[in-house]
């Protein structure tokens, strides 16, 4: 999955990243689903140790264009985990109370505690994406935020939070199909908003904003991964694999018991 990593200080050109890529998986959906089940089973084991050890904090940031698959990734990759140790935070249009504070105020409150995985469905990156594309703030404001985001994430990392950031990369044609499905299928209509089509018209502007954000904020302590996301099953595998390898790398262990198991007799 290293090839999806955005190297710090590299310049991202999304047109060179194929959203239809499915890596070494040529067996398709079925093989993909079986593989995901194995990854998720191992993730469940690791999460149990993370929770028991109560020492590490894990933050997963999910960003994507509309229909990019943030909800589906949360359901398929993190849904099977123990809900006691996973928390999802969704960031919507800021409330007046949130807008009355600095842009990181609402974000910091949702960062993970010890033993917890926090999954951000959208994040502080909206403040250099929709805010930039929609000119919700002048350039003089949003352009200074990349550095502030890096500083903020550095604080979290140095204080012991492991950070992973995923951009779920789909193309325009795939988005069209997914919007169409939201219109055609009654059970999906609640997800569709006619305003979404206005955002779609701004696709090139969003691409530029994403390229800038990915280029400027992928760091060693808080790396971005550009995940090919046209194929949902592969997107899930790619995200699960990166999370899995990261958790494996933490060297977690169940805490040593404060008693000698051999010396205890229960009458
Ligand atoms: P959804 O994810 O479909 O529920 O939509 C959430 C909406 O909130 C999206 O249109 C985001 O662009 C918007 N949003 C999230 N964060 C911000 C922000 N900081 N400023 C403005 N809009 C935001
Ligand atoms: Mg939406």
Image (cartoon, rainbow, N blue to C red):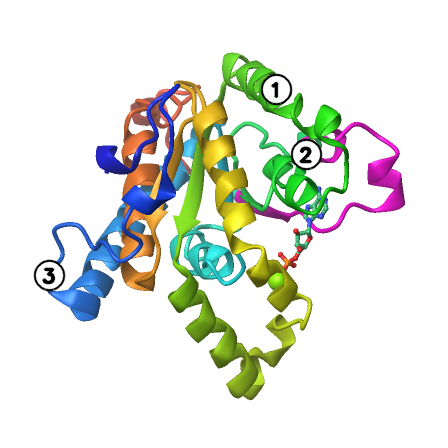
Lower sequence index among marks 1 and 3: 3
Number of the label disc, if any, that sits on residue 40: none
Magenta part of the chain: 86-107
Could you classify mark 1 by the number of other residues whose Cα lies within 10 Å: few (under 14), some (14-19), or many (20 or more)?
Answer: few
Secondary structure of the residue carrying tag 3 is loop
| Residue that appears at 38% across and 33% down | 12
Lower sequence index among marks 1 and 2: 2
Along the viewing direction, whichever of 79 and 252 lies nearer the viewer: 79
Q: Is residue 191 placed above or below 113 in the rendered structure?
A: below
Q: According to the image, label 1 marks what residue? A: 152
Q: According to the image, label 3 marks what residue? A: 26
Q: Residue 43 at x, y = what percent?
A: 33, 44
Quarter containing the C terminus: top left
The answer to whether marks 1 and 2 mark residues whose Cβ atoms lie closer than 8 Å is yes
Q: Residue 197 at x, y = what percent?
A: 61, 68
Secondary structure of the residue carrying tag 2 is helix
Check residue 158 for magenta coloring: no
Q: Is residue 229 placed above or below 182 in the rendered structure?
A: above
Give residue 101's quadrant in the image.
Answer: top right
The answer to whether marks 2 and 3 mark residues whose Cβ atoms lie closer than 8 Å is no
Lower sequence index among marks 2 and 3: 3
Give residue 53's quadrant in the image.
Answer: top left
Number of the label disc, if any, that sits on residue 107: 2
Q: Quadrant of ligand 2?
A: bottom right
Quarter containing the N terminus: top left
| Residue that appears at 37% across and 32% down | 265
Along the viewing direction, whichever of 201 and 100 lies nearer the viewer: 201
Find the distance from the CA under tag 2 to the CA under tag 3.
39 Å
Residue 138 placement, left or right of 112:
right
Could you classify mark 3 by the number of other residues whose Cα lies within 10 Å: few (under 14), some (14-19), or many (20 or more)?
Answer: few
């Amino acid at each position: 999955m290293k090839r999806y990593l955005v190297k710090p200080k590299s310049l991202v050109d999304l047109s060179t990243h194929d959203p239809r890529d499915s890596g070494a998986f040529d067996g398709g959906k079925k093989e993909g689903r079986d593989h995901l089940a194995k990854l998720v089973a191992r993730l469940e084991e690791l999460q149990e140790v993370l929770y028991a050890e109560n020492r590490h904090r894990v933050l997963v940031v999910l960003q994507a264009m509309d229909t990019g698959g943030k909800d589906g990734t949360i359901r398929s990759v993190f849904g099977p985990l123990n809900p006691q140790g996973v928390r999802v935070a969704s960031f919507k249009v800021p409330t007046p109370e949130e807008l009355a504070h600095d842009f990181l105020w609402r974000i910091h409150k949702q960062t993970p505690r010890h033993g917890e995985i926090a999954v951000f469905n959208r994040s502080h990156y909206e403040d250099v994406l929709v805010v930039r594309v929609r000119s919700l703030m002048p350039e003089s404001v949003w352009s200074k935020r990349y550095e502030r985001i890096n500083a903020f994430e550095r604080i979290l990392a140095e204080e012991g939070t492991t950070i992973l950031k995923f951009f779920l990369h789909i193309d325009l044609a795939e988005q069209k199909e997914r919007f169409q499905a939201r219109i055609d299928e009654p059970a999906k209509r609640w997800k569709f908003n006619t305003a979404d089509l206005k955002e779609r018209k701004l696709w090139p502007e969003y691409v530029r904003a994403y390229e800038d954000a990915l280029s400027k904020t992928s760091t060693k302590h808080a790396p971005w991964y550009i995940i090919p996301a046209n194929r949902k099953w592969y997107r899930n595998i790619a995200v699960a694999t990166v999370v899995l390898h990261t958790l494996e790398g933490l060297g977690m262990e169940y805490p040593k018991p404060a008693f000698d198991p051999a010396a205890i007799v229960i009458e």
